[in-house]
Image (cartoon, rainbow, N blue to C red):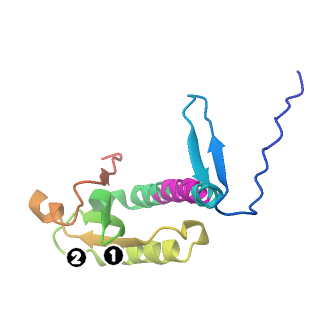
């Protein structure tokens, strides 16, 4: 097995923030931007990667929670509401399930205190089983995910 070598990184020193740099990707497009814009683009890209990873962790954590409480849950959604992420749980019955509500509150506290989810503004909500119209008013129809699990 051969030894892999990696090319040396290109070092761009931030001396003059308005100095122009040219970036030429594989597709041969060229981007001319200032050093300040390059630094901002790198920072934004790294934040996006971190956000994606945190969102993946959140989806998985909520999925594990659903599996533990699936007998009490009719449906569960992840959506956007008020500029943050909403984990919406529809309980199986029409009468408030205090056990499910308490367990969801515990998950909410766990998520809020998790430094690994620091970029996400997450809220949780449990609703009694109702009509599609009842649930629909809580879902952002431009972005929503419905959990699918062993029912």
In percent of the image, x 48 and y 57: which residue is there? 55
Residue 12 vs 2, above or below: the answer is below
Residue 71 x, y percent position in the rendering: 32, 58
- Quarter occupied by residue 72: bottom left
Query: In what element is the residue under mark 2?
Result: loop
Crowding around mark 2 (Cα neighbors within 10 Å: few <14, some 14 to 19, many 20+) is some
Q: Is 39 placed above or below 10 here?
A: below
Q: Secondary structure at mark 1?
A: helix
Q: Is residue 30 above or below residue 110?
A: above
* Disc number for residue 101: 1
**Residue nearer the viewer, 95 or 32:** 32
Q: Where residue 40 appears, x then y in whole percent?
A: 59, 60
The stretch in magenta equals 43-58
In the picture, measured across the screen, residue 25 lies left or right of residue 144, that is right
* Marks 1 and 2 close (CB-CB < 8 Å): yes
- Quadrant showing the N terminus: top right
In the displayed structure, does residue 44 sit left or right of residue 76?
Answer: right
Is 15 or 133 nearer to us in this picture?
A: 15
Which residue lies at the image location 10% right of the left edge and 61% below the top edge?
Answer: 133
**Of the pair 150 and 117, the residue shown nearer to us:** 117
User: x%, y% of residue 39?
Assistant: 64, 59
Q: Is residue 50 magenta?
A: yes
Q: Which residue is mark 2?
A: 96
Q: Is residue 97 left or right of residue 63?
A: left
């Amino acid at each position: 097995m051969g030894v892999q070598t990696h090319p040396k990184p290109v070092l761009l020193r931030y001396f003059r923030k308005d100095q122009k740099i040219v970036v030429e990707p594989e597709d041969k497009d060229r981007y001319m931007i200032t050093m300040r814009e390059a630094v901002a683009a790198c920072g934004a890209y790294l934040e996006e990667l971190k956000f994606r990873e945190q969102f993946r962790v959140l989806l998985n954590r909520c999925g594990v929670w659903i599996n533990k409480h699936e007998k009490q849950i009719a449906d569960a959604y992840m959506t956007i509401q008020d500029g943050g992420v909403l984990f919406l749980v529809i309980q199986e019955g029409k009468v408030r399930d205090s056990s499910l509500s308490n367990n969801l509150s515990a998950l909410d506290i766990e998520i809020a205190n998790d430094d690994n989810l620091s970029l996400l503004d997450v809220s949780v909500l449990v609703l009694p089983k109702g009509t599609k119209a009842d649930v629909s008013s809580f879902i952002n129809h431009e972005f929503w995910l419905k959990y699918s699990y062993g029912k």
